[in-house]
Image: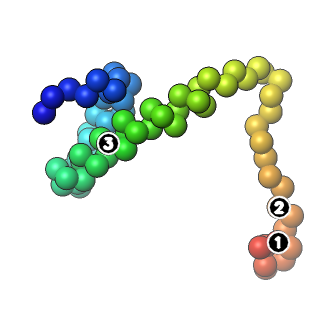
Amino acid sequence: MEPDPKRTLEQDLLFAVVKERYGHLLTEEQMEEVRRAVVGLRDVVRPLRSIRLTNDVEPFATFAPFRGDRNDG
């Protein structure tokens, strides 16, 4: 297999972690699908990493009050 120019060291390391932990449970076909998914994360992660947050930005939290046994709104 020829190296994919879009792959990065970070993606290779992430895939190596998955392979080490779960490789014995997955077929070669499934492992290749995992590799494609890890490489595809690059397009998702890039915009998220471009956002610079300062220490005064708090995490977004949702509030859902408890309404007895049913808590679906």
Please tell me whether mark 2 sits on a helix, a strand or a loop: loop
> Residues at badges 2 and 1 in contact (C-beta under 8 Å)?
yes
In the rendered view, does 49 fall on the left or right side of 70?
left
Quadrant of residue 36 within the rendered picture: top left
Q: Which mark sits nearer the N-terminus, 1 or 3?
A: 3
Look at mark 2 in the image and give the residue it sits on: 64
Counting from the top left corner in percent of width and height, residue 2 is at: 15, 28
Residue bearing the label numbered 3: 36
User: At x 76% / y 37%, what residue is drawn?
Assistant: 59
Which residue type carries mark 3?
Arg
As measured in the structure, the alpha-carbon distance from the residue carrying label 2 to the one carrying label 1 is 8 Å
Q: Residues within 10 Å of mark 3 (few under 14, many from 20)?
A: some
Q: Pinpoint residue 24: horizontal percent, then vertical percent.
A: 20, 50
On residue 73, the disc is 1
State the image coordinates of residue 63 (x, y, percent, origin top left).
84, 55
Would residue 65 appear left or right of 16 to someone viewing this image?
right
Q: Residue at x 83, y 24 (%)?
A: 56
